[in-house]
Image (cartoon, grey):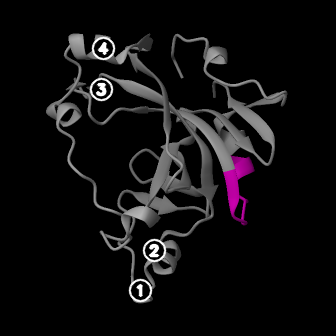
């Protein structure tokens, strides 16, 4: 990632040695995981509420999810939460499943982590970026980098096409491995370095 930031200030110290890995090495670590596994993930993605200029989103955000669950199959999760055994998930759009933990973009061929975030565990926003440099939310507003969706968000439907209750709702995270800054798996922190 090409970001100007000392991320040490964003990540709490926990005395665990950080192992540096490439994107491909991280995929090789995550892909064979077959049991329900909780990971702590710090990642950077485009903020969908920001304006797009020449095909590039103007604001990115770094977020952390301390309890992201791998190998929680979507259809089964909806069935368990709703009691509706007839529920069938829609086909993945633009993605192909590689394993219970990895998806691949049909357009770019890039691999993505497939995680679930249960209700009560949310993504904690660590900071925003504009053109690779850290920016405050106030400065992004002053620079007119947001679309109307930022100011007037539309309510989101719960999972299972609205069948999961608000108190049982969960979220899906499918972010590219190349956008992961750090991830903690089975007590080991991994930091993604340049490819």
Give the residue pinned by disc 4.
138
Counting residues from the start of the chain, the first of labels 1 and 4 encountered is: 1
Counting residues from the start of the chain, the first of labels 1 and 2 encountered is: 2
Camera-near label (3 vs 2) is 2
Residue drawn at the location 38% of the way across and 32% of the way down: 46
- CA separation, marks 1 and 3? 41 Å
Residue 96 in the image: x percent, y percent?
Answer: 47, 61
Q: Badge 2 local density, few (<14 within 10 Å), some, or many (20+)?
A: many
- CA separation, marks 3 and 2? 34 Å
Image position of 40 with respect to 82: above or below: above
Q: Badge 4 local density, few (<14 within 10 Å), some, or many (20+)?
A: few
Q: Secondary structure at mark 1?
A: loop
Q: Are marks 1 and 2 in contact (CB under 8 Å)?
A: yes
Judge whether residue 170 can be spotted in this image: yes
Task: Quadrant for residue 189, please give it.
Answer: top right
Residue reaching furthest to the front: 167
Residue 70 in the image: x percent, y percent?
Answer: 63, 58
Q: Secondary structure at mark 2?
A: helix
Residue 141 in the image: x percent, y percent?
Answer: 24, 16
Q: Secondary structure at mark 4?
A: helix
- CA separation, marks 4 and 3? 21 Å
Residue 157, magenta (yes or no): no
Residue drawn at the location 83% of the way across and 31% of the way down: 16
- CA separation, marks 1 and 2? 8 Å
């Amino acid at each position: 990632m090409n970001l100007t930031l000392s991320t040490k200030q964003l990540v709490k110290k926990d005395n665990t040695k950080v192992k540096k890995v490439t994107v491909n090495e991280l995929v090789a670590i995550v892909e064979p995981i077959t049991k329900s596994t909780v990971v702590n993930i710090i990642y950077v993605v485009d903020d969908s509420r920001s304006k797009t200029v020449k095909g590039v989103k103007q604001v990115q955000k770094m977020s952390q999810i301390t309890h992201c669950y791998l190998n929680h199959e979507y259809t089964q999760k909806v069935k368990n939460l709703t009691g509706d055994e007839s529920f069938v998930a829609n086909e993945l759009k633009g993605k192909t499943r590689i394993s219970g933990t990895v998806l691949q973009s049909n357009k770019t061929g890039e691999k993505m982590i497939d995680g679930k975030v249960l209700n009560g565990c949310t993504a904690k926003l660590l900071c925003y970026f504009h053109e690779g440099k850290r920016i405050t939310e106030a400065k992004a507003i002053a620079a007119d980098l947001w679309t109307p969706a930022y100011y007037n968000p539309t309510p989101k439907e719960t999972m299972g096409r609205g069948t999961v209750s608000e108190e049982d709702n969960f979220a899906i995270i499918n972010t590219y491995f190349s956008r992961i800054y750090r991830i903690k798996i089975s007590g080991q922190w991994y930091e993604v370095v340049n490819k």
